[in-house]
Image (cartoon, helix red, strand yellow):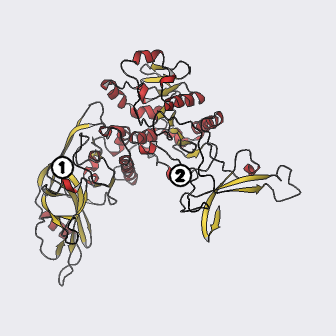
Amino acid sequence: MIILVNGLQQRFFLSTPEGDPAARWIQNRMLIPHVGWPYALALAKTCIEECVRDHPECQAITPYPIGSAPLPTRLIDCSNPDRLRLVATDPGMRGVYIALSYVWGEDQPHQTTKANLSSYKDRIDPAILPQTLRDAIHVTRALGIDFLWIDGLCIVQDSEKDMHHELARMRDVYRHAVLTIDASSAARVSEGFLQDRKLDPMPDAVLPFICSSGNPAEQSADEARVGVIYLAGDRSLYYTLHDSRVVYYGKPLSHTVSRGWCLQERLLSTRSLVFTSQTLQLRCHTQTKNVGGAHHDGDYDVPRLPDAVFHPDRLVAPGSDEWKHIHERWWEIVEDYTRRKLTNPSDKLIAISGLAEMFAPTLGQDYLAGLWRNTLLTDLSWSCDSPQSLSLTEYRGPSWSWAYIDNSVSLEDDWGTGVPFAEMMGCTVTLQNETLHFGPVTGASLILRSSLLPCKWVNEQLYPEEYDLVPEFPSFSSPFSLDQSLYFRRDVDITDLLETRMWFVPVVHYCDPDELCMRGLVGDVYRRVGLADFEISVIAKQDSMDTFEDSDVDSMLSRLPRVDIELV
């Protein structure tokens, strides 16, 4: 609905409560604030059943028919709320279970350990569990499911052997669950997620709605009643009727979207029941909808995985448009993931390993600490959005991998359009545990055959506190002109670099008619510390060309001596 406010067009969403006389004409409903009430969970159950029964897109990516999925190693038996217990499944057992995705946010003193494992198999006292886990058990029972998977209870937390075994199966835990409960509204495990929501701010306006067919002769007494409609402003507008205060309609405020582990838990799940800070949603591979029929703003949705990664036996030709889309989606996931928080920085690779395992059959089985061997040279063109200190407390990946960085990263927009200049002579990674093929590494080495160009720091004349990094390029005769400095995107703070001998290692080059761009790594021979571009331009000159030809590029590149360079 478009309304003129102060001479400007603004869009508003209309809604009315279920049962209101206006409901016959207005399809959108109000957000459900009582997310834990029986009627809300009954509506959610209906939505889940409709998804299982009526969504061919979801059926196509479901690895097993309902009831025949392999069960995880352990599950919480919720069938008797007074006697919860941890059950160990036998290999090959199949059935139905729900998984939980939530934010720990604090220690869980009653998590499963070697000391209490035996007693938990007999009984778990619900009173000792944090509220989020109790809420998840309540929802599981309300949906008619007996078994629930919770990481803190179904993995023996002080057993390295059990931890490695279960982390290797993390992808399957969420892929095979009939549903994932997403406790988005809880910032910590003790908070719970079934509290009544406070819809604040309230809708911008409440208006009467005359329920009339327009024909008095055909109008019944019921139709003549007056209903109520609510107006809420579009979230994309800068202001609404409430004095420049934006009123968000259905905005799914969430704590799980800021946590690293929760990304793969959401993307791997066929469907999720999401308890947002405002209402209750069902998210599946087909759609995201607010339970109860309220309007949902899809701008906040996390994009789904490409269909191809759910079908590893289907061949996707490398370099095809579909393959490029899958590669782009992988990097979108990496960019999203690196913006999220991890309590333990050492989890950098393991917390996304389930997704890497999904992409591996398409992007190439050889996964190198967050990058893929088949596209490694061009994938090195990632840059850090905010430099960090070199003094990292623990190893989490090689300097040439985004896993080394605590801050967010992004891949350059022109990925895939460049021509490799460097050659990859070898790349090896040492896994922390051989059973975790996509997990943590303890060491890695990348050997590139490329040029090694020394660089020097130069103070800017106008801003003495700022520095340019200038490479010592071989002399080129006219008509070529070299930029005086690198376009340098640092991975680390400049204070860690000023006393360090720096080198530029060209990796790929980009060429248009009047400019050759060399893109490569900047480092101290042993470590990458940033990404840089170096531009070589044509000087228009009488009786000389003013555009680059392929032969000119080949001529310039051939002047650069090459050596083997190891980066760790």
State the residue at coordinates (17%, 67%).
Answer: 459
Count residues near mark 2 (Cα–Cα under 10 Å), then give few for <14, some for 14-19, many for 20+. Answer: some
Residue 206 x/y as whole percent: 69, 55
Instruction: Answer above or below: position of 375 versus 181.
Output: below
Residue 403 x/y as whole percent: 29, 45
Residue 467 x/y as whole percent: 20, 64
State the residue at coordinates (50%, 20%).
Answer: 125
Residue 402 x/y as whole percent: 29, 48
Numbered disc 1: secondary structure: loop
Which residue lies under the disc numbered 2? Answer: 298
Separation of marks 2 and 1 at Cα, in angstroms: 41 Å
Q: In the rendered image, is residue 215 in sight?
A: yes
Q: What residue type is labelled 2?
A: Gly
Tell me which corner region of the image, top left, top right, bottom left or bottom right, holds residue 471: bottom left
Q: In the rendered image, is residue 311 in sight?
A: no
User: Is 286 on the left-hand or right-hand side of 265?
Assistant: right
User: Is 310 on the left-hand or right-hand side of 416?
Assistant: right
* The C terminus: image quadrant: top left
Query: Viewer-proximal residue, 204 or 270?
Result: 204
* The N terminus: image quadrant: bottom right
Count residues near mark 1 (Cα–Cα under 10 Å), then give few for <14, some for 14-19, many for 20+. Answer: some
Which residue lies under the disc numbered 1? Answer: 527
- Circle on res. 112: none
The furthest residue to the bottom: 542
Instruction: Answer above or below: position of 494 versus 4.
Output: above
Numbered disc 2: secondary structure: helix
Q: What residue type is labelled 1?
A: Arg
Instruction: Answer above or below: position of 370 versus 411.
Output: above
Of marks 2 and 1, which one's residue comes earlier in the chain?
2
